[in-house]
Image (cartoon, grey):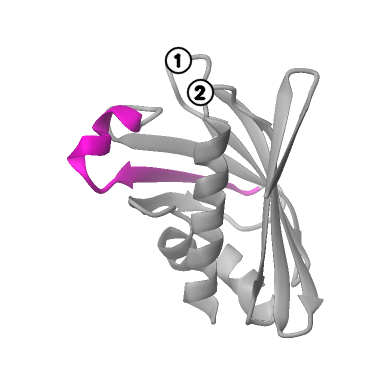
Amino acid sequence: MTNTQGHGKRTDTASRVIAASPATLYRAFVEPKAVATWLPPAGMKGHIHSFEPRPGGTYRMTLAYERPEHSAAGKTSGNEDVVEGRFVELVPDERVVQRFEFESADPAFAGTMTMTWTLAPVAGGTQVTVTCANVPEGIRQEDHIQGLTSTLANLAEYTE
């Protein structure tokens, strides 16, 4: 997991080899039920409200904390994070680029973040790398990297 800072904007990256083909992994990115299953990090559940997996297509997703003690952690409301997304680029079996708008009354959590998912065939499966650019400053870096790592583990469990 790496992170960089530049011009006040942060980039966080996480990567993992998953024992699945790029085609299998790509399908997990473009099927809404799959995304709702593997994308939420540990301790959260996902609900897809809308999902159009094509360049320019939009989606809306709610990530809800499963346990009440996390209720203060939500960026949108007490126990939820609501994200509006747009598919910027979809290259089958290679790359998915998404842009997220975070809804929050707190400017530290609001803003637009770009996530690039890269799928590269390697011995034993596929190297999946997620790079998040322009991470809102209110998202603690340690928490974000932990969440990305958890999401990659979920993706592995879903596809392997």
Packing grade of label 2 (10 A; few <14, some 14-19, many >=20) is many
Q: Confirm or deny contact between disc 2 and disc 1 (CB under 8 A).
A: yes
Residue found farthest to the bottom:
124
Q: Is residue 124 shown above or below 31?
A: below
Residue at 63% from the left image edge and 49% from the top image edge: 57
Amino acid type of the residue tagged 2 in the rendering: Phe
Residue 25, can we see it? yes
Q: Position of residue 138 (x, y in %)?
A: 52, 22
Q: Which residue is drawn at 32% across and 44% down?
A: 64
Q: How far apart are marks 2 and 1 (CA)?
A: 6 Å
Question: Does 53 sit left or right of 103 as displayed?
Answer: right
Q: Position of residue 37 (x, y in %)?
A: 41, 64
Report the label total. Answer: 2
Q: Which of 154 and 105 is in front in this view?
A: 154
Does 59 sit above or below residue 103? below
Does the segment drawn in magenta span residue 61?
yes
Name the quadrant containing residue 17.
Answer: bottom right
Q: Which amino acid does label 1 sit on?
A: Asp
Q: Nearer the viewer, residue 9 or 112?
A: 9
Q: Is mark 2 on a helix, strand or loop?
A: loop
- From the image, tell me which residue sits under label 1: 106
- Left or right: residue 60 compared with residue 2: left
Which mark identifies residue 109? 2
For this rendering, which residue is in front, 57 or 113? 113
Figure quadrant of the C terminus = bottom right
Is 43 placed above or below 17 here?
A: above
Q: In the rendered structure, which segment of residues is drawn in magenta?
A: 57-73
Q: Residue at x 63, y 79 (%)?
A: 24
